[in-house]
Image: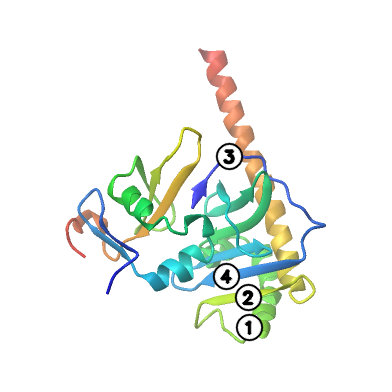
């Protein structure tokens, strides 16, 4: 992946389709707004990665999906209908195999809503991380 | 059978990735890395910096900055055995 440090935003009106991938062996979940595209990746928190092109968010990666869901019960509860929806659309099982799902926001409504919640959390995490960096930089300037 | 990545890391541990993994897991989600197998192998062989993954004991992040800006290539390697005793072995 490519790492960068740009300010992220999301084009909600332009969101028509999403792509979801799950690597069972490595427990990595990847969401793409539209189809996967060339992008930079920002780590916004432990195991949370935002993919962006020219300041616009085009995807999200979670390294350790099950661990992240376990750590946040609200996310875990929200993910249950998402998992059911993806399994119903693909005929695949999260417990048995890798998953790849692509569809319109109408075909994957729960997954789309969950993705937008996660993106909101990610932007929040990004801003928190940047604020901490700026505060640390300011502290060093004042101390120096 | 040829491999997409077949390299020895900076500590002497072999790191491999077959073409099915390369296309099915890496390029499928990171198209910016298409055709850059040798660059990824170079990052593993000669990284600028290596960070231990905070959550997975067997994963390390190999970092290299190809240009002048602050964009890094981050290659995540998962080892099949404890890296402390794996030097030169698979």
State how far apart marks 3 and 1 are (Cα). Answer: 35 Å
Q: Provide the chain ID for the residue under circle 4.
A: A
The kind of secondary structure element at disc 2 is strand
Q: Are marks 4 and 2 in contact (CB under 8 Å)?
A: yes
The residue tagged 4 is A21
- Determine whether, in the image, residue B68 is placed left or right of residue A53: left
Quadrant of res A100: bottom right
The residue tagged 2 is A101
Quadrant of res A102: bottom right
* Label 2 Cα crowd, 10 Å radius (few <14 / some 14-19 / many 20+): some
The kind of secondary structure element at disc 4 is strand
The answer to which of marks 3 and 1 sits earlier in the sequence is 3
State how far apart marks 4 and 2 are (Cα). Answer: 6 Å
The answer to which of marks 3 and 4 sits earlier in the sequence is 3
From the top left corner, tell me how far across and down residue A22 is, in percent.
54, 71
Q: Residue at x 49, y 68 (%)?
A: A27
The single residue placed furthest to the bottom in the displayed view is A91
> In this view of the protein, can residue B57 be seen by the observer?
no
Q: Are marks 3 and 2 in contact (CB under 8 Å)?
A: no
The residue tagged 1 is A90
The answer to which of marks 4 and 1 sits earlier in the sequence is 4
Is B81 located above or below residue A138 in the figure?
below
The residue tagged 3 is A5
């Amino acid at each position: 992946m490519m790492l960068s440090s740009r300010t992220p935003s999301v084009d909600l009106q332009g969101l028509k389709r999403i792509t979801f991938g799950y690597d069972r062996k490595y427990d990595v979940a990847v969401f793409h707004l539209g189809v996967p595209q060339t992008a930079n990746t920002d780590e916004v928190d432990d195991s949370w990665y935002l993919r962006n092109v020219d300041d616009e968010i085009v995807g999200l990666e979670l390294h350790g999906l099950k661990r992240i869901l376990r750590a946040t019960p609200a996310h875990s509860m929200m993910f249950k209908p998402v998992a059911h929806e993806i399994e119903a659309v693909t005929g695949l099982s999260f417990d048995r195999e890798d998953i790849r799902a692509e569809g319109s926001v109408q075909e994957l409504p729960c997954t789309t809503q969950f993705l937008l919640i996660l993106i909101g959390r990610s932007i929040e995490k990004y801003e928190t991380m940047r604020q901490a960096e700026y505060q640390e930089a300011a502290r060093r300037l004042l101390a120096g | 059978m040829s491999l997409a990545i077949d390299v020895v890391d900076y500590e002497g541990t072999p790191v491999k990735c077959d073409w099915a993994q390369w296309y099915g897991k890496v390029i499928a989600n990171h198209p910016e890395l298409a055709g850059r197998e040798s660059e990824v192998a170079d990052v593993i062989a000669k990284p600028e910096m290596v960070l231990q993954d905070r959550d997975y004991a067997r994963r390390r992040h190999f970092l290299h900055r190809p240009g002048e800006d602050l964009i890094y290539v981050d290659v995540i390697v998962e080892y099949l055995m404890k890296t402390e005793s794996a030097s030169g072995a698979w």
